[in-house]
Amino acid sequence: MRLYIKNYSSYRGDLEDIDIKKTLKQNYKYDTRRQDEFIHLAVYGAKLLKDKTQISKDDELYVTTGVGNVSIVHKTNTYIYEQNQPLKLFDFINLLGNTTSYYVASALGVEGKNIFQISDNFTYINTLISLYASINSSNKNAILCSIDLLSSPDEIIKRVLGVDESCEVVSSVNYQKFSLDAEDAMAKLEFDAKTYSIEEVKEMILNTDAQVQLSPRCIKLDAQKDGVFFETMASYAINNSIKRSKNMLYVDCFEDKYKILKLESLR
C-alpha cells in the first residue's frame, strides 16, 4: 500500500515547553471551555496543520491514540469510586473518543468521514490501513491525527504499553495529510498488513540505504532508537524524516512481532 504525504504537523512535550491551552486562546482565539488536556492537544496539532496546508471540507479525518484519554478515565474513577460523587456531564462527554474527533473536525473545518480508532498495539499502522482502504474507494484526501497524552501517574501508561519502568513517556500529537496523488507530495509512505519475524527485519535492515529507526520496544535489534516513548511515535518519526528530507525504514515491535514503514522523501 502506498500513500503520499502532502503536509504534516508535530508537537512533542519534551521538545517544546508551551502552555497549549494558553496558546490556543492567544494565538488562535480558540474557545477552550468544556474541553480537557487531551482535546486541547489534538486541536493544537490540528491548528498547526491548518497553518501549513490547504484543507478541504471533504477531507476524511482519522484520530488514533495509544491508550486514549487516560487522564479523564482516572478522573472519572476518582469521582465515582473514591469520592462517591456523580460523574460531571462534560467529563462524561469528553470521555467519548468521538468528542475529540468532533473538536478536531471543527478546528480543521472538515465535514467528511470522521473516525476515532484505537487498535491493540500497532494502532498507527492499523489506522493507516483503514485510511488507505477508505480513500482508495472514495478517492478523497485524508488527515490522520496521532495523539498520546502523558498522564499521572505515568506507571499506568508504561504497564499498558509494555515498556520498561525506566523509559521516559511523553505527550505528543502528530498529523499528516494523505493522498493517493503524488503531485506536490513531500514524501511517499509504503506499508502493508504483514507481521514480520525478526529474521526478516534484520534482512531488510541489511539491505536498505534508508535511515533505520526503531521503536524503543525493539530491544532485540540494534539501530537508532528515540530516548523516549509514546505509542504513536512512528507518526513523529515520519514527520521528523520529512523535515530532514531523509528516507527512513521504521520498525515497530510488540511481543516479538514486527511491523514496517518505508518513507521516501520527495523533496
Image (tube, grey):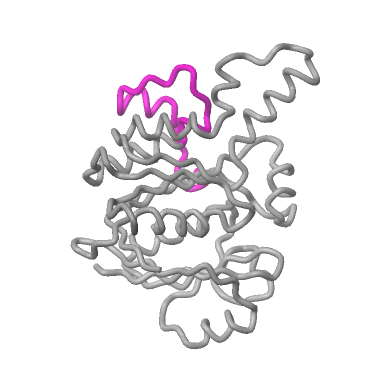
The residue at 39%/58% (across/down) is 132
Which of the two residues, 98 or 201, is positioned nearer the viewer here?
98
107 shown above or below 30: below
Q: Position of residue 91 (x, y in %)?
A: 59, 20
Judged left or right of residue 235, residue 214 is: right
Q: Position of residue 69 (x, y in %)?
A: 59, 35
The residue at 70%/56% (across/down) is 163
Residue 40 is a magenta residue: yes
Q: Position of residue 110 (x, y in %)?
A: 30, 36
207 shown above or below 36: below
The residue at 54%/34% (across/down) is 97
The residue at 51%/59% (across/down) is 125
Which of the two residues, 46 or 95, is positioned nearer the viewer here?
95
Q: Position of residue 190 (x, y in %)?
A: 40, 69
Which of the two residues, 78 or 113, is positioned nearer the viewer here?
113
Judged left or right of residue 253, residue 260 is: left
Judged left or right of residue 118, residue 56 is: left
Q: Quadrant of the C terminus?
A: bottom left
Q: Quadrant of the N terminus?
A: bottom left
Residue range highlighted in magenta: 13-41
Q: How many marks?
A: 0
191 shown above or below 63: below
Residue 47 is a magenta residue: no
